[in-house]
Amino acid sequence: MSTVHDPLKPPAGRIEVKNTTCYMCACRCGIRVTLRDGEIRYIQGNPDHPLNQGVICAKGASGIMKQYSPARLTKPLRRKDGAERGDAEFEPISWDEAFEMLTARLKKIRATDPKKFALFTGRDQMQALTGLFAKQFGTPNYAAHGGFCSVNMATGMIYTLGGSFWEFGGPDLERAKLFVMLGTAEDHHSNPLKMAISKFKRKGGRFISVNPVRSGYSAIADEWVPVKPGTDGALLLAIIHELIRTGLYDRDFLVQYSNAAELVSVEEQSDDSGLFVRTDIPRDPDCFDPQDRVWWDRLSDKPVAARTENTDPYLLGEFTMADGRRVKPAFQLLKERVESYTPAWASEVTGIPEQTIQRLAYEMGITARDEQIELPIAWTDVWGKDHETVTGNPVAFHAMRGLAAHSNGFQTIRALSILMSMLGTIDRPGGFRHKAPFPRPIPPCAKTPDSPAGVKPDTPLAGMPLGWPAGPDDLFVDERGEPVRIDKAFSWEHPLAAHGLMQNVITNAWRQDPYAIDTLLIFMSNMAWNSTMNTSEVRKMLNDKDDNGEYRIPFLVVCDSFQSEMVAFADLVLPDTTYLERHDVMSMLDRPISEYDGPVDSVRIPVLPPKGECKPFQDVLVELASRLHLPAFVNADGSRRFRDYPDFIVNYETEPGSGIGFLAGWRGKGGEKFMKGEPNPNQWKMYEKNNCVFHYEMPKSFQYMRNWNRGYLNWAQEHRLLRYAEPINIHLYSEVLQKFRLAARGQWDGKQPPDRLRSRVETYFDPLPFYFEPLEAHFTDKHLYPLSAITQRPMAMYHSWDSQNAWLRQIHTYNYMYVHPQTARAQGIDDGGWMWVESMHGRLRCLCRYSEAVEPGTVWTWNAVGKARGAWGLSADANESRQGFLLNHLIAEELPANEHGAHLSNSDPVTGQAGWFDVRVRISPAAADEPPVSWPQFDAMPAVPGTAKRPKWLGYFAGLFTAARKGGTTK
Amino acid sequence: MTQLALVIDLNVCVGCHACVTSCKEWNTSGSAGFLVDENPYDKDPTGTFFNRVQTFEVGEYPNTETVHFPKSCLHCEDPPCVPVCPTGASYKREQDGIVLVDYDKCIGCRYCSWACPYGMREIDEKQKVMKKCTLCVDRIYDESLPESERKPACVLACPTNARLFGDVHDSESEVSVAIREQGGYTLMPEWGTKPANHYLPRRRNRKYIHDDELVRADNPLKKEQRGPSAPVDEPTLDDSTSW
């Protein structure tokens, strides 16, 4: 029977629609999933979700192909007896066996030396739970991916403003008139930034992008300012120079809301050298800046307590206190600092014309001053003064890894934060806006233990595994000043390593420096490929054995959803679910999805049952914690406290009766409370009914100036977001950094760095931002390696997450190295030809693509499109491994041995942020007789048990797909 | 007469490919489905997509423009793909101007793809029929969907709202206003196909700085000048004369 052509007729099938939260990247958009006969028919943006308001990106819309990928792990796997690590020879085992094996091992470690268990995770968004597990276990060796991602952005801004970009704050493009984006690729963040830039442009805003590459967001900028990688700090300092020279800064804002006018002792020999002059106002015991500073009053020409009514301080000048101490306002020190950072100087460093630098400064300064916004919102400041309006200077910034992933990134981002403050744009309309639970005190209160005594058998860690040191005495070091953590975070090598240094874990564990560990559990991180520097060598370390024939890292557990490169090296593989098969929370205790107008958190609720024997990692942790009797997970009688992860989420409280849990919405017995309240047994249901999201919109008067907004601070204190309702003044001048510097100079009555690190700490812990070339350049012959090599991620492919995705891999099947034609031609490299790229650490062969959209001293490529053969369920001749390549082979995880140490991390010396973008390279053509294949190549990884056969073709049609596949064909 | 179409704003398109995969996921399971993928996990994967984004560079460094250019069937008012079809499978709907293929009639001869000057048709190698953008005809009239969602999947998805959808024959529609006011243009009009889809060009905002904006009476540096610094106890005219 022939059918009549009816293009409107929907295919038959049982339709269900469910809401959850996307996880194709870290943006966490609300999604609506339509199922037909139990298979995914359509994933769309949830129009009722505050984050993405109905839109979705290329990745989000390809969730179907993630779900049904043949690369999915479906069974717990144990490395076969006799098989070597890396061979990927596994046998399936039951979950019971897996749990028993793990529990026995971990129990023994916990009872003897808990730090021999290390837990490191990728971009998992469940750090509140993984961190709790580590703390309860008692190991300090825990971190997520922040150390190799953007910890410079977090620390540089948080140690200055009490907040930072992305999850915790961002540009207010709704009100901004000028938007300056620095070093932002295409994924930090995704949909909300795309939506905002588009609206901003359509309303006539001016968008300037500073970036070595013009792609993605930069493509639609009104002006592209190409910059040499790693030199943004020079640009920013020169802009600060110009703003001070011309008086284009917001004086009133700086005086009241920053420490710009506060007097600093400039007596070099004194123990208070570089510290603030203090009055006798009683100090708070804890982690807030006490209000005990001093101004030099212009009106009386005398020192007065800072912020005394009817006084007005000098920002510039030098003064002498009654006791003879010479003092200067912090702003004077900043002015002196940037004196030599002229636009002419910065032009040499950055490659940006002097006139452009000057014009950028003027555009920022004039827009901020002359296009001021005044909103009719009355508010009261923390000192009790009423304001009729909220004002804003509409210049907004956004920056990400282009600034952060350099070893000079921390000071660069300090400079950016100071620039934003000088323009008077902090938590004001049109500028930078915080998102709950930020702003935090500077620095935030959480601290690690401060000595090895914090780690004890069968005892939770005496502090957090990660924290925010406020001074040298907060460091997590032994009596010799040496690290307690395996990644050496919070030691003198990287004192403010707030996110840890995951990038050094394998190397350190392999070298057994500072000690040997036993078990390394890696969740969702591809440490044998793109999530590691020096990839080729690290793969060998994972396999390396000691003289007794034992692996130097004795036991490796990998939890992942797909057959990644890392899986090959596991002793035990735990199959995770996809995001569509799990419960999950975007918690206020971690990185929620708050909006500028108030706190927002959200959940994932499964829309499909787990495939095979997949188990959500959250459930694995709850199960393990219960079996290990970790105190927070058992009752007083030792019995299990939480049935599973959903039960944990509802009933866990940070302390018994605290009323604070992982989810902020619908707390209290009947769901009538929020932020704080008793557990609510129906909490999940209530989230489900409300688009899986909780959003509290604060009164308008609480939405701005939150560092100093009495209404907001009191509200935040009442709802337990903050311990104190104290002002969070901007650290233009960082006394925190100065304390480390004093310790390095031996002028600190407390912990002191080991001698080899004294001059390093003294140099880089400068209380004012300064420019230095990234560390790698100090050790590189720049004539031999004249080019910078950087990566970015395309909008359609997040990290290494989606080469197993049949649709997304058609968009990015392999990667080129993009080279300016002049640069390439000078070396005789053809467009589309094979080329060698060489750093002082290694070399690789790849394809060249000419591009006029890259600064000629820079070459770049898409990150993590290149794959190892056979990984991710791809065939051994897939383009990803034969034409694609990974730049990481050229990037070292450690600096060359130098006077500060033989094995220092290739990281920011302040924060431990991995210096991904510091590598310098040279390029040359591949010889005509070389094979047209990328290099290095690795032995093909075989398919592991439980993964599916690769079909030769796909015809996805929801409702018929699985059945058709079982029959060996599609439809 | 209605002519539905897309208007694509190149001024805000960042080349994210949301439209590409949203189109794919909707249509592979819809009335046009499935959309085949060949070698999905092997060398040289390729598949049927109704919508693709091309990226190209214009100009020389540092005055380079990177342009992201989404392309799909333009639903021409005078579509050359229709008269060449030997079976009548390729047709233009009278009620809304959407150009469609009747898969039951299509024999996969490819005449239409040769006739299309824009290369917007894709043969499905498994089903041996020609496929192309339907403007999600199976969404836009579906009354089971909320009215706000009766739009092509690419339009709903687009994070920058670069894709506008509507009737280009209605002079007051959003798309017509955008074309009129923002210099909307069609591709290769010289072919006389009268594409219904339009593109909006890049626009650029500048700031002009006047010299006197840098010289201001309320310059905060003035406040940093120290008070009267001339000494009062040194000789002046007062010490030497009484006039």
Image (tube, rainbow, N blue to C red):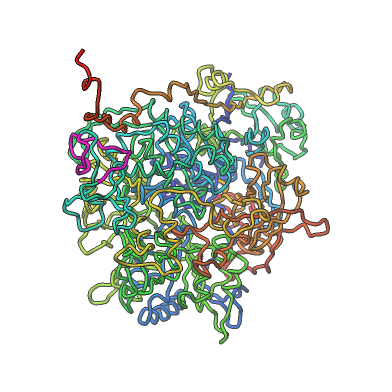
> Where does the magenta region start and end?
A300-320
Count the marks: 0
The rendered magenta stretch, by its main secondary structure, is classed as loop
User: Picture coordinates of residue A394 (x, y %)?
Assistant: 39, 31
Query: Position of B183 compared to B82: left or right?
Result: left
Residue furthest toward the bottom? Answer: A548
Using the rendered view, name the quadrant where residue A761 is placed: bottom left
- Residue A834 locus on image (x, y percent): 75, 53
Q: Is residue A412 above or below residue A53?
A: below
In the image, residue A492 lies at what x, y percent?
Answer: 41, 65
The residue sitting at 39% across, 58% down in the picture is A583
In the rendered image, is residue A609 in sight?
A: no
Magenta stretch: residue B135 in it? Answer: no
Question: From the viewer's perspective, is residue B122 above or below residue A478?
Answer: above
Residue A431 visible here:
yes
Query: Most extreme residue toward the front, as rendered?
Result: B240
Q: Of all residues shown, which one is farthest toward the top? A: B243
Out of A913 and A723, give the one closest to the viewer. A913
Q: Is residue B60 above or below residue B37?
A: above
Left or right? Give the position of A86 relative to A46.
right
User: Which residue appears at 74% of the width and 35% of the height?
Assistant: B113
Q: Position of residue A295 (x, y in %)?
A: 24, 42
Residue that appears at 33% across and 65% down: A448
Q: Is residue A374 left or right of residue A415?
A: left
Query: In the picture provided, is A133 more to the left or to the right than A934?
Result: left
